[in-house]
Image (tube, rainbow, N blue to C red):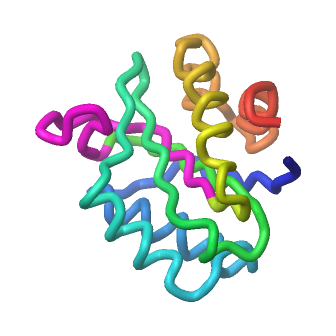
Amino acid sequence: MGHSTLVYRNLDFNTSNDILSFLADKLKEEGYAKEGYKEAILKREVEYPTGLPAEIKIAIPHCDHTLVNESAIAVGVLNNTVNFQAMDDPSKTLDVQIVIMLALDEPHGHIEMLQKIVQLIKSSDDLKKIIEATSDEDVLQVINNYLN
């Protein structure tokens, strides 16, 4: 499944909504996401939170494939963590530092991609590489090992 990967590092946001809005706007600006994508991402996060526990915590926001023109992944690396609710237990708050927003144009793409991201989460070393990266290429190198 081919997709583009967009990387944004050194981000400063205070809330999950801010980072979600930023990444969704980028996906739309770049032509990957349709009108309504951002609203769907924000709404879905409230109903089905996407924070995942790991040594360095990740959120994997996504929404329906019908709001996607062409598959892409937007990776946001935050300087400071923001709070996301946990996917497995929304009463728990996770301090997330990496957001991997999925804009996938196939109905079943998310499940496949999720499995790949779970592999990444198991590697604390690679998560550290992402947050310590000094270039977008460094981030892509790690991400592409898992997601391509």
Which residue is found at the position 40% from the left and 29% from the top? 57
| Residue nearer the viewer, 122 or 47 | 47
| Quadrant location of the C terminus in the rendered image | top right
- Asked whether 108 falls inside the magenta stretch, the response is no
Q: Quadrant of residue 96?
A: top left
Residue 38: give x, y in percent of width and height: 47, 75
In depth, the one of 138 and 115 nearer the eye is 115
Q: Main secondary structure of the magenta part?
A: strand
- Residue 29 figure quarter: bottom right
Q: Nearer the viewer, residue 81 or 100?
A: 100
Residue 31 position (above or below residue 122): below
Q: Which residues are magenta?
A: 82-102
Residue occupying image coordinates x 27% and y 37%? 86
Q: Is 52 in front, or is 21?
A: 52
Q: Is residue 71 placed above or below 117 in the rendered structure?
A: below
Left or right, 106 with reference to 56: right
Q: Relative to residue 108, is residue 79 depicted above or below?
A: above
Residue 28, given in percent of the width and then of the height, sits at 64, 78
Q: Is residue 70 left or right of residue 111?
A: right
> Is 136 positioned to the left or the right of 97 in the image?
right
Q: Residue 70: give x, y in percent of width and height.
A: 78, 69
| Residue 72 x/y as whole percent | 73, 59
